[in-house]
């Protein structure tokens, strides 16, 4: 079936550096994508979203890039901080469905 | 309320027992979702409500799982004859309208442990 996946299950980044978390999706009908951040013991927290008619969207310290040609989504975090340490999920939406990937753990090193 | 709330935050039960998990969505949100999250996994879709009706229950694993939303606000996920494999975090989310194109806002989850 269709699925959302991630290239890297874990990512360690030095504090202050930029982080890039990648995600591959396989359903070409997906037209809405979201990145969520999940800290230990908490529910997923919305970070940023993008619709398929866009290829880039910026938020506060975060940027999401969408490459529909290769079905790839990335989340860029600028000047990574210790508070960014969490598991990050990408999710794709199509029709009434919403599918999450398995997640990438981001560890910020002091 | 300010966000999605779920009760209880933790639930420990014995195999074979019945449990109910409650979700209070954001006020005014018509769509409500239940997900199950196992350790180290992403949330797995269970059921989606639009108003009072279950618009999509294709994610419910078997007939031991059932959910209701009688007044279109609060929802209860019910699990009968619990099994150890049901142990997971059960997440609830709500969105303003419907479908996979709306941002879903998640609650903190209920951690269910079946002994």
Image (tube, helix red, strand yellow):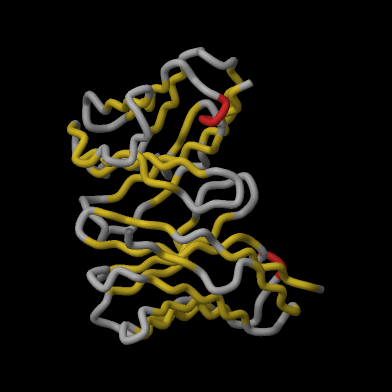
Q: Residue at x 73, y 71 (%)?
A: A108
Q: Could you tell whether B12 is left or right of B103 in the image? A: right
Can you name the residue that lies furthest to the top here? B17
Position above or below: B105 against A109: above
Q: Is residue B31 above or below residue B61?
A: below
- Identify the image quadrant of residue A54: bottom left
Total number of numbered discs in the rendering: 0
Relative to B91, is B82 above or below?
above
| Quarter where residue B26 is shown | top left
- Give the position of the N terminus of chain B as an image quadrant: top left
- Is the residue B38 above or below the residue A60 in the image? above
Q: Which of B15 and A30 is in front in this view?
A: B15
Q: Is residue B97 left or right of residue A22?
A: left
Q: Where is residue B92? Give x, y as percent.
A: 41, 40
- Point 65% across, 82% down: residue: A79
Residue found at x 47% / y 33%: B6
- Residue A103 coordinates in the image, percent (x, y): 54, 61
Is A28 on the left or on the right of B4, as rendered? left
Where is residue A31 drawn, in percent x and y? 25, 70
Q: Residue at x 27, y 32 (%)?
A: B73
**Quadrant (top left, top right, bottom left, bottom right) of the C terminus of chain B:** top right
Task: Give the percent coordinates (x, y) of residue A62.
Answer: 51, 77
User: In the current view of this chain or complex, which residue is farthest to the right?
Assistant: A110
């Amino acid at each position: 079936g269709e699925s959302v996946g991630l290239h890297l299950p874990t990512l360690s980044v030095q504090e202050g550096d930029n982080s890039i978390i990648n995600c591959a999706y396989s359903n070409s009908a997906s037209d809405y994508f979201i990145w969520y951040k999940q800290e230990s013991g908490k529910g997923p927290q919305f970070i940023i979203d993008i619709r398929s008619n866009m290829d880039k969207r910026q938020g506060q310290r975060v940027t999401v890039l969408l490459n529909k040609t290769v079905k790839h989504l990335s989340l860029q975090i600028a000047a990574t901080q210790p508070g960014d340490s969490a598991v990050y999920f990408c999710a794709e939406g199509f029709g009434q469905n919403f599918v999450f990937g398995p997640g990438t753990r981001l560890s910020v090193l002091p | 309320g300010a966000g999605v709330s779920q009760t209880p935050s933790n639930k420990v039960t014995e195999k074979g027992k019945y449990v109910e998990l409650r979700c209070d969505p954001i006020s005014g949100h018509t769509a409500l979702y239940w997900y199950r999250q196992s350790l180290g996994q992403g949330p797995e879709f269970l059921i989606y409500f639009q108003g009072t009706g279950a618009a999509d229950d294709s994610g419910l694993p078997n007939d031991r799982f059932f959910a209701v939303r009688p007044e279109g606000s609060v929802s209860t996920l019910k699990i009968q004859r619990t099994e150890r494999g049901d142990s997971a975090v059960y997440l609830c989310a709500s969105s303003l309208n419907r479908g996979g194109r709306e941002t879903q806002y998640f609650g903190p989850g209920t951690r269910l442990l079946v002994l």
